[in-house]
Structures are given as structure tokens and as C-alpha cells.
Amino acid sequence: MKKNVGPVDRIIRLILALIFGILYFTGSVTGIGGLVLLVLGIIFLFTSIVNSCLIYTLLGISTAKKSKKK
């Protein structure tokens, strides 16, 4: 898997995953909305851990820094 998630993007995804998890598990958001937030939080957590996002790959986007080749 090609890495296409940069450090700032990764931190934002982790923060959003944490917020979504807190909202779901405290019962602040319930029902379908809560489940959607939970799934999005899991996706954000996974993509931040593996540094790769399928949607970015499909759209040809990368927030990761380009490595300099010598």
C-alpha cells in the first residue's frame, strides 16, 4: 500500500476518530447517526495507522511528503 497520508492529515484523522468515539460511547449521538460516526471513526483510525487512504488513491491525492531520491 502506497503511503499517501501526511503527518498533519494523520493527526486530524486521529483527533476526529477520538471525538467520534467519545460521542458514540457516551451516548451523545445515538441511532443511525451514532453508528455512522462510529464507522467513520474506525475508518479514520485505520487510515491514520496505515498512512494510506483508499479515497486519496482513487482521486490521485497525497498529503504525504515526497521523499527525495539521490
Image (cartoon, rainbow, N blue to C red):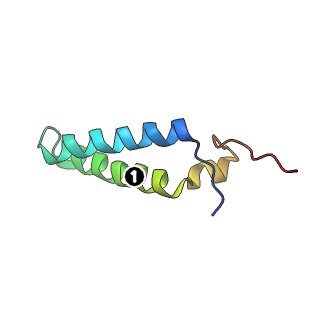
Percent position (x, y) of residue 1? Answer: 63, 64
Question: Who's the residue at 48% across and 53% down the image?
Answer: 47
SS of the residue at dot 1?
A: helix
Q: How many marks?
A: 1
Residue 9 placed where, x, y %?
52, 38
Q: Residue at x 29, y 45 (%)?
A: 37
Report x, y in % for residue 17.
34, 45
Disc 1 packing (10 Å; few <14; some 14–19; many ≥20): many
- Furthest residue in direction right, as rendered: 70
In x, y percent, where is residue 4? 63, 49
Instruction: Report whether 65 appears left or right of 5.
Output: right
Front position in the image: 30 or 23: 23
Q: Which residue is mark 1?
A: 45
Q: Nearer the viewer, residue 49 or 23?
A: 49
Kind of residue sitting beneath label 1: Leu
Q: Residue at x 36, y 38 (%)?
A: 15
